[in-house]
Amino acid sequence: MSSTSSNQMGQLVADKHVRYILMAEKKKESFESVVMDHLRMNGAYWGLTTLDLLDKLGTVSEDEVVSWIMTCQHESGGFAGNVGHDPHILYTLSAVQILALFDKINILDVGKVSSYVAGLQNKDGSFSGDMWGEIDTRFSYIAICCLSILKTLDKINVEKAVDYIVSCKNLDGGFGCTPGAESHAGQIFCCVGALALTGSLHRVDKDLLGWWLCERQGKSGGLNGRPEKLPDVCYSWWVLSSLIMIDRVHWIDKEKLVKFILDCQDLDNGGISDRPDDAVDIFHTYFGVAGLSLLEYPGVKAIDPAYALPVDVVNRIIFTK
Amino acid sequence: MHGRPRKASKPEEEAASDAKATKLRSLQSQFMANHHDKIYTNEAIELSTKLLEINPEAYTAWNYRKLAVEDRLSRIESDQNLVKSILDEELNVVESALRQNFKSYGAWHHRKWVLSKGHSSIGNELRLLDKFQRLDSRNFHAWNYRRFVVELTNRSEQDELQYTDDMISNNFSNYSAWHNRSVLLSSLLARNADGFIPNKKIPEEYDLIHNAIFTDPDDQSGWFYHLWLLDQTVNVETPLLTSSWPSHGSSIILSGPGYLNGSSSNFTTFCSESDSFPLILYFDQAVGGVSSSTVTIDAELKGNEDLVWEPVSNKNSQISCVWVARLKYFSSKPCEYKVKVRLGNSPGIVSSRGCTFSAPYEFVFTAHVHEIVKDSQEGTVSWTDGFDIWDAQSKDLNPLVILDQLNAEMDVKWREAAILEEVKCFRLLSDSKIGKLSLARLLMAYEAMISDAAVKGIHYEEILQLYNDLMALDSSHYQYYKDAHSLVFLHKVTSSTESLSRHLFRYRDVNNLVCLRLNNLSLSRIASVEKLLFIQMLDLSHNELHSTEGLEAMQLLSCLNLSHNRIRSFSALDSLRHLKQLRVLDVSHNHIGKHSVDTTRYLCASPLSNSEWIQDDVGRQKPGMGTKYWDAYFVLRDLNLKQFNIAGNIIAGDDEFNSFVLQVVPTLVWLDGQKLGS
Ligand SMILES: [Zn+2]
């Protein structure tokens, strides 16, 4: 992107976002953070990955984060969303991703974490989120991503896992959370991501899905998650990463999307919201910055569309012993 | 926070919020104590109810309630009334949690869990759902739950189809209802349910979807359903053979590596170092099971009894549109062979949807083995001169003649009628985006269907114009229409012998190679490859291509010019790995190394997709190289290039990369126009 066009559309106030993330961590007593208490592990992943994308991961205490993560691990090998909560695959991936950010995978008992994840695979190839048996293709992605990072994908039946995901493919080319469920951009990211990580993208109908995805961009430049819904910054990530993985991202107008994301910044206090002038939160701050990264916005590190980790972190995991 | 306005809160609001936070915090810590001590008293359970009413997302509390239910059920023997009252209580808690947050995954799953216990009140669920779905007709949790209840109660698909009718007639702008309709209808059609015959149902569905699209052409709810119907109209399930090389009735000249004396310009000449030539089969859809038992070869060529057929596709896949086998021959003395290929006589070739290739088909070609007169030289291939005009008498254009097999399987009549009806309809809507796009797609589908040579091809100009209009009308999706435009353009070029031969040449300097020049056409995408299997030299320079996807089928390619395009990375060249004959590759003046985002990173086999590892010699000896240029490594490793041009790309700027290339491609003689070692 040329510097003139980014001037016209305003700039990313990176420093303010960094401050917002560091502050949000301290505001543990607000009602919002109490409500979010159970998914603090996700919150930590969103915040820390954003900091890394902005090249500011060094501002947090690695030891503090890592030791807190380890107190969330259960005997089963799975991680909880916070101390005292039950383990769930959702938070297990976040924990593994954060450790990957800090290059600290080696402190894990990899066999144990892998067994927890592999133990959630069902006979039909699908995955449950935890021992209570909720099934969703989100969990398929999480399992595959987690085991790819740990390099233990051989612990599950990959072929069946892929077949199950393909069985959730719809006639619009998208994917739902279970067979027959409606396509949704978040779910599409999970399924396309899982297929990408298993070298199975040939099972995606790229042109059909690409058209559905690129039509998520409306007049405002923002992306929605399903037809006839409002645009939302978080879909910058779900839709963009999916479009990139199937090599159809040129079908949208990137400049307009950059502008939409930048318009959702809180220029005074930092943070990014779902739509312009809504209240900011850490979730949308992450998805906004990650979206800008996928749009090659200057000053933001490149993020990998499938692992949802910075490219340098992924390369470190994959290409070194 | 979704949909909450950004504003500084007033002091009194902040105080109220603080009080709420304190209350929730205390509920949470009391709950945690109960959970960890496994306390399931009424009082403790009541506390978790309060917590979930305020925060339905507190997943650990739902887990706790499941444990509590199991604990209570284990104490009460088989008193059905007590069981019912325990489970009813759970349903009530879920209902009030859903009132607080309709999108709570935990709450919906808890309800499913309760009902899976065999709760007697399952009949009430659809009534409750109707209430919820009236409030939010797009809530996908509710729709998913609906499918769950329908399955549990064995409600019929016809009844559910009627429900989508009701939803749609109430408000056509309901993508969720259209989606569910497509699921139900495809199931009913697939199992030939009573009254669900495609030639009757699909035209009816077209009528229904018109009402939606014509009411508000900008509303997307019906767009994808319409495209799905079109797909149902044109596509047949059973796989068919689209083309082959050599094609039926053709003659080819085979020889060892080197130059032939004045080789005939009427036939394709194929020189091989390995004394074998590819036999290519191109199907209309990806199939598996192509083998020496499903494809039989009658040939005087010895040593081809157990041919090995390989899919030309992703490593992980055993299905592909394109299959290739290598036939052996002896180049030592001149002779002539007839080869007959038969397929479909025994079952085994099966599509990914499980349909069997069943119509027997055979084709025959002649192979002449010629002697070479001199060894090959190490000269460079020039893309500027040495081209002769195409000889119109050449037999090589046989592949353009559509195989009789196409259309034979189909009941074309109702399909053609349905499409023509649609064309008529959408002409009325041709000032809107969806009107133009649908019309372009319909005309394209119609072109593929008509067999009358007199009218075939007459729609291409109109289709191209529609895409031009769309690029102007909907500039956000410019490149989508641009890609479609390229696709139609290539269909047009390959639609007749006359139009294709305008782009065909013979390359005099190397055995009269068959050369196709599609340079300078602003193509952004490759298509119609199935008609170009006989091409040996391809000039795609000065276009807007960003990937070589599709070229993998062109197994005869030995020279490829992709200079001055928009290739962004080596992984975008992944399909070239399949081209065993490729010797000359020009990718100069592209964008390799310029971008931080690689859009083809996951479309190629690599360690990232757990589908390839750096385990060979170069990978082991120079791990750093393999890491830094891994995508280049995986493509170049499989190529036996003699001439390679990469100048004018950011990646080619440094010596490290050049020395990497020399290491990975030891066969290289020319790099960026310089002869190596001189
Ligand atoms: Zn959002």
Image (cartoon, coloured by chain):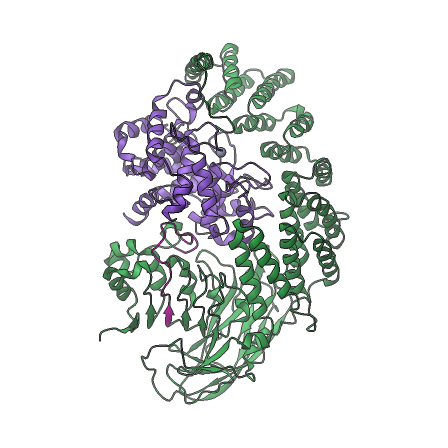
| Left/right of residue B9 with respect to residue B634 in the rendered view | right
| Total marks placed | 0
Q: Start and end of the magenta stretch?
A: B584-605
> How far from the left and from the top, in percent, is residue B178?
66, 42
Q: Residue furthest left?
A: B678
Image quadrant of residue A151? top left
Image quadrant of residue A301? top left
Image height of B501 relative to A240, above or below: below
> How far from the left and from the top, in percent, is residue B414?
75, 59
> Looking at the figure, which quarter contains the C terminus of chain B?
bottom left
Residue A307 visible from this viewpoint: no
Q: State which chain is coloured green.
A: B
Which residue is at a point 74% across and 52% down the rendered structure image?
Answer: B203
Q: Residue furthest top?
A: B43
In this view, the residue in front, B40 or B10, is: B10
Residue B241 visible from this viewpoint: yes
| Left/right of residue B283 with respect to residue B621 in the rendered view | right
Q: Is residue B101 magenta?
A: no
In this view, the residue in front, B164 or A237, is: A237
Q: Is residue B598 magenta?
A: yes
Question: Magenta: predominant secondary structure element?
Answer: loop
> How far from the left and from the top, in percent, is residue B466?
61, 58
| Left/right of residue B117 with respect to residue B127 in the rendered view | left
Image quadrant of residue A60? top left
Which residue is at a point 47% across and 43% down the rendered structure image?
Answer: A257
Q: Colour of chain A?
A: purple
> How far from the left and from the top, in percent, is residue B24?
45, 15
Image height of A303 relative to B508, above or below: above
